[in-house]
């Protein structure tokens, strides 16, 4: 029962408020006018905004894929290390979180700027001669997002791989499976829950990211998180901002529900 | 998903993982700024000051605390819209805030401001001529200008040898990738509109469209849209032209002496951040005493020396460091005044700007 109250007060009530506001209208000076209209949702289908959603989904998908490609070998290595080392590696993954995300994003700006650390290192070994322009581009945003969310991929993957029964893998080798088959037909299916949990934990926050595109992308282009922030804080159109937030949330929930449905069907 | 989570949580390391994930998720959130607490008052009275970040020296606050025998708690916001959104969102308990000109009129209309009693703010007498009885609050019923300045162009004179005098320099392809613009819809449109000889407060859709086309043309030249670190970009040489407020440009000059500032000939924004007392304040007398303190000649001069924004107190100017006093980025030259324009709320036309800005951002 206390859990129910907690959920009600801290989850459903705020969400309900967002939902209700999303049907209202913006007052002339930015307040909320309590009329009922679907205008905010219709407005959202504007091709202009659709392009922002598409961009955000694409960037979030790219972030997820890169995190998975980097995170899987890393998680595998950690899970297979001696127990004492596992704790050390996991600790190292968590330590960056002790510093505020904003500060770490600023650090990346220093690394990526045209004559920053990255450039200095590459030019000292003679790999580049002219300044490299990575900062303030989509590449920089991708680097920032991957950096920020990689631990969310590694931790669930680690949990899944750590539980993986080694004897099953050994059996596959004994049956002359190639390295690729062992991975594709034994390791991956058995760690799939971890892969999916990791992908969701990376994908969902990346779609709504707004600090990274602002700082590393130089605010040259918007992601849906920036659009929501812009509607709330600059245009002061809370109803429209609420509608976008709600639609985004619905999209993610539908995605998860569809996945869950497919999963249970397969399981049966 | 449920399956996944259950599997994870039955892992031998479940407590460890759960704790790590929680820590990670919590740490990933931007730190929220705490509003004033509404809890029981401590023995000493507390004054809540809601202001821009790094806008008041802690030593000045300590002085006021000692003088008045109170405690001052500072909370910060990073844009006028954020200030309004927080107050409209129900944040109460603040006593003094510092909205800019156009926001004073919006806040007054929204009934968020308390009327000032000028007899309690004697330092308001020293208000500079140019800042008296401004259209957004002609009788100073709600606000007293505090710090003010212009929006212009900071540039590196070592690279740009002929001093620019027009906004059009921001469209010069020679400086591709070396230009920063404010990340501020109204100001960026202001620069484009003025370069076209228009007012930054236009509500004419065709004119706004024209400015949008101009900004889309400019975008390939722009390295970044930023409102808060163009001073560092100028100082490090990452950009050689920065659209921005005078104060940060003046701060960049300290690090790179070849930086200069110009108020373009087509005109520019003049702004003033104003001290106001909020309607919800329970300590209006103390709040007004604090306002008076900040407007004091010596305190104001020290504030200007530190922030490199001009003080509204005309007597303070004489006490400011000569270097800052003669810096056009801090005190705009007298000749610039007739081409300065205040930004006003454009009402529903904000929708047009908003859409146009989003389109610029999508290119």
Image (cartoon, coloured by chain):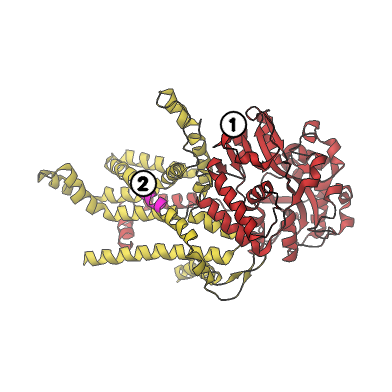
Chain colours: A yellow, B red
Task: Identify the residue shown where x is 21% and y is 46%.
Answer: A183
- Dividing the image into 4 quarters, which one contains the C terminus of chain A? bottom left
Q: Which residue is mark 2?
A: A67
A62 drawn magenta: yes
Residue B206 x/y as whole percent? 63, 58
Task: Identify the residue shown where x is 29% and y is 56%.
Answer: A193
Is residue B351 found left or right of B312 in the rendered image? left
A229 drawn magenta: no
Task: Identify the residue shown where x is 36% and y is 46%.
Answer: A67
Magenta stretch? A58-64
Pair 1/2: label in front: 1
In which quadrant of the rendered view does residue B352 lie?
bottom right
Q: Chain of mark 1?
A: B
Q: Nearer the viewer, residue A67 or A162?
A: A67
Task: Identify the residue shown where x is 44% and y is 23%.
Answer: A124
Query: Which residue in the rendered view is the most extreme toward the left?
Result: A175
Q: Which residue is mark 1?
A: B236
Q: Chain of mark 2?
A: A
Callout 2 environment at 10 Å: few (<14), some (14 to 19), or many (20+)? many
The rendered magenta stretch, by its main secondary structure, is classed as helix
Marking on residue B51? none
Residue B216 x/y as whole percent? 55, 48
SS at circle 1: helix
Q: Nearer the viewer, residue B25 or B150?
A: B150
Residue A104 x/y as whole percent? 50, 41
Residue B6 seen anywhere in this rendered image of the structure: yes
Callout 1 environment at 10 Å: few (<14), some (14 to 19), or many (20+)? some
Residue A30 x/y as whole percent? 64, 64
């Amino acid at each position: 029962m206390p859990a129910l109250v907690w959920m009600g007060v801290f989850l459903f009530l705020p969400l309900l408020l967002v939902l209700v506001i999303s049907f209202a209208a913006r007052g002339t000076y930015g307040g909320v006018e309590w009329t009922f209209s679907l205008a905010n949702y219709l407005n959202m289908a504007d091709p202009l905004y659709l392009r922002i959603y598409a961009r955000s989904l694409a960037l979030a998908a790219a972030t997820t894929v890169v995190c998975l490609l980097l995170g899987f070998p890393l998680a595998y290595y950690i899970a297979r290390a001696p127990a004492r080392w596992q704790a050390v590696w996991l600790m190292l993954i968590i330590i960056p979180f002790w510093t505020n995300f904003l500060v770490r994003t600023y650090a990346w700006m220093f690394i990526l700027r045209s004559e920053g650390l990255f450039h200095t290192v590459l030019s000292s070994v003679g790999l580049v001669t002219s300044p490299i322009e990575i900062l303030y581009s989509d590449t920089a945003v991708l680097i920032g997002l991957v950096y920020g969310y990689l631990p969310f991929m590694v931790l669930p993957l680690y949990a899944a791989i750590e539980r993986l029964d080694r004897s099953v893998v050994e059996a596959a080798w004994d049956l002359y499976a190639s390295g690729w088959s062992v991975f594709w037909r034994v390791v991956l299916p058995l760690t799939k829950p971890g892969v999916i949990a990791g992908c969701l934990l990376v994908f969902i926050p990346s779609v709504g990211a707004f600090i990274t595109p602002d700082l590393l992308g130089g605010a040259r282009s918007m992601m849906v998180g920036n659009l929501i922030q812009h509607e709330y804080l600059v245009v002061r159109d809370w109803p429209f901002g609420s509608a976008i937030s709600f639609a985004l949330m619905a999209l993610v929930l539908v995605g998860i529900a569809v996945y869950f449905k497919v999963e249970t069907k397969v399981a049966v | 998903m449920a399956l996944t989570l259950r599997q994870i949580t039955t892992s031998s390391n479940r407590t460890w993982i759960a704790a790590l994930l929680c820590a990670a998720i919590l740490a990933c959130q931007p730190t929220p700024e705490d509003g004033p607490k509404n809890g029981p008052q401590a023995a000493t009275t507390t004054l809540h000051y809601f202001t821009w970040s790094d806008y008041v020296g802690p030593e000045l606050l300590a002085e006021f605390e000692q003088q008045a025998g109170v405690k001052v708690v500072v909370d910060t916001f990073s844009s006028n819209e954020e200030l309004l959104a927080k107050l409209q969102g129900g944040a109460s308990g603040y006593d003094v805030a510092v909205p800019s000109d156009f926001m004073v009129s919006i806040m007054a209309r929204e009934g968020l401001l308390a009327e000032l009693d000028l007899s309690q703010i004697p330092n308001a007498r020293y208000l500079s001529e140019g800042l008296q009885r401004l259209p957004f609050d002609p009788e100073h019923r709600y606000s007293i200008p505090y710090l003010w300045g212009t929006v212009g162009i900071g540039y590196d004179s070592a690279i740009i040898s002929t001093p620019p005098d027009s906004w059009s320099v921001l469209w010069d392809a020679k400086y591709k990738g070396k230009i920063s613009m404010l990340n501020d819809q109204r100001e960026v449109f202001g620069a484009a509109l003025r370069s076209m000889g228009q007012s930054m407060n236009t509500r004419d859709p065709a004119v706004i469209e024209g400015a949008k086309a101009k900004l889309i043309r400019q975008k390939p030249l722009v390295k970044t849209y930023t409102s808060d670190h163009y001073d560092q970009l100028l100082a490090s040489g990452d950009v050689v032209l920065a659209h921005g407020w005078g104060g940060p440009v003046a701060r960049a000059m300290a690090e790179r002496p070849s930086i200069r500032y110009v108020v373009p000939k087509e005109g520019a924004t003049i702004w003033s951040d104003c001290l106001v007392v909020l309607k919800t304040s329970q300590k209006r007398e103390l709040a007004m005493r604090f306002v008076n303190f900040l407007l004091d000649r010596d305190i104001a001069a020290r504030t200007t020396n530190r922030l490199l924004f001009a003080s509204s107190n005309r007597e303070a100017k004489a006490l400011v460091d000569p270097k800052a006093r003669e810096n056009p980025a801090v005190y705009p030259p007298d000749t610039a005044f007739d081409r300065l324009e205040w930004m006003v709320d454009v009402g529903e036309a904000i929708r047009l700007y908003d859409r146009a800005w989003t389109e610029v951002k999508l290119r």
